[in-house]
Image: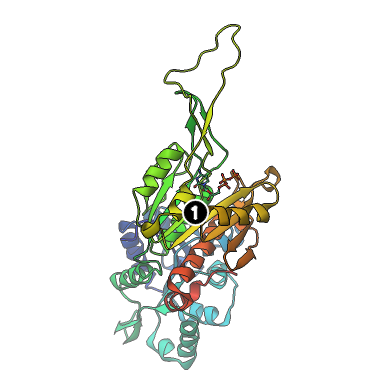
Amino acid sequence: MLHGRRILLVLSGGIAAYKSLELIRRLKERGAQVRCILTANAQNFVTPLSVQTLSGEKVFTDTFSLTDEHEIGHITLARDCDLVVVAPATANLIAKMATGLADDLASTALLVTDRPILVAPAMNFRMWEHPATQANLATLKGRGVTTVGPNTGMLAEGETGMGRMAEPAEILAAVEGLLAAGPLKGIKALVTSGPTYEPIDPVRFIGNRSSGKQGHAIAAALARLGADVTLVTGPVELADPPGIITVRVETAREMLGACLGRLPVDVAVCAAAVADWTVSNATKEKRKKEPGAPPPVIELAPNPDVLATLSERGQARPRLVVGFAAETEKVLEHASAKLARKNCDWIIANDVSPATGTFGGDFNTIHLITRAGTEPWPRASKADVAERLAWRIVDALKGEHERHRLHPAAAPRR
Ligand code: CTP
């Protein structure tokens, strides 16, 4: 199944584009999200309307459409996916990819993407056999691009030869093969996210401003790389990420119980903003204002520390435990102290003072602190931070070698 996997399908201008309509249908049936870019020539063979109807997504055709650029820039479009599929890939588009031309949306997206690329060539057999095409394909393969087909058979012009685009079922199998071989396949991951709410009474609680965006993005990124992910989340306004087991909790105690119930895992990432205290004199009924009475006194008791508890599980300790340090001052100093105090392996220090807009926002500026030292990461979207962290986890658990072997084209931006 391809549940929750995001595919960017680029259609260039060949008669085989009609087969890509069937490919879209099959990808959708398997649960994938399919966004499509049509070149100008592709639109001579299939219409944006048919592609849009089958994909259920807006179709992209032109780099300079102001509306598209407003809603989703071409760089985001090219990177916000798990795999780019080019089907049909004409000799022309393959040549552009090999030489790095970017004169329309399709070629621009292919030049800026950092995701794995699968190419399904489709062309006349003379074009296929031409040394230029073969050299271009060799260049692309050298850069980690995967190809499927072409097949031998009757071509559109009535000639027979090599150049028929692979059948939709073959392309689908190649897609599934590429995505299934995620470098974290077989790895169990646990991620905490969001705030916790500690009840004062049935209608009031102590909470915090965490949106859960960073934790949810980390869970989704680990799942995209093939991990078997459980997300334990406090109350957030985000949808459960697809392809992940999501356990919704309210309090810190419930979060700890849900996490311990998922052990053993290989890696735990504690991104939740867990309340440090619970209300020990919470009432079963709503607290009422008594005329003339002083305001109620709320008594607090410490909450368990999920991160520290996971770090001290002895035999059941995850191989890698990653914490966050949300700080508003002396960020690195406080974060390093937390790494030592909570006995985790890495800590991600982030400045959450109001001026940074981190809490609730879409961007994050972090430092990764490991036992080996401190790395500043450039300011990036929470999705990009998550992606980069997920690849660091691949490196830590499986080694650099495996990462390059499996996804040579998807090395993270460093
Ligand atoms: N954490 C946790 N359980 C808690 C408190 C914190 O698992 N009861 C985890 C958070 O998920 C995060 C890390 O510990 O990964 C640090 O959380 P943070 O709120 O920055 O620090 P605190 O430990 O709460 O310390 P302080 O409030 O003093 O900064």
| Residue at 38% over, 73% down | 15
Please say if 303 is above or below 41: above
Residue 226, picture quadrant: bottom left
Q: Position of residue 75 (x, y in %)?
A: 58, 63
Q: Quick one: 387 or 350, which is closer to the camera?
A: 350
| Residue at 57% over, 65% down | 371
The kind of residue tagged 1 is: Ala
Residue 35, picture quadrant: bottom left
Badge 1: few (under 14), some or many (20 or more) residues near its Cα, within 10 Å? Answer: many
Q: In the shown orientation, is residue 273 left or right of residue 243?
A: right
Can residue 69 be seen here?
A: no
In the rendered image, which residue does mark 1 sit on? 217
Can residue 180 be seen here?
A: yes
Question: In the rendered view of the protein, which quadrant contains the C terminus?
Answer: bottom right
Q: Position of residue 263 (x, y in %)?
A: 35, 54
Q: Position of residue 48 (x, y in %)?
A: 45, 59
Q: Quick one: 43 or 70, which is closer to the camera?
A: 70
| Residue at 45% over, 91% down | 130
For mark 1, give the secondary structure: helix
Please say if 407 is above or below 46: below
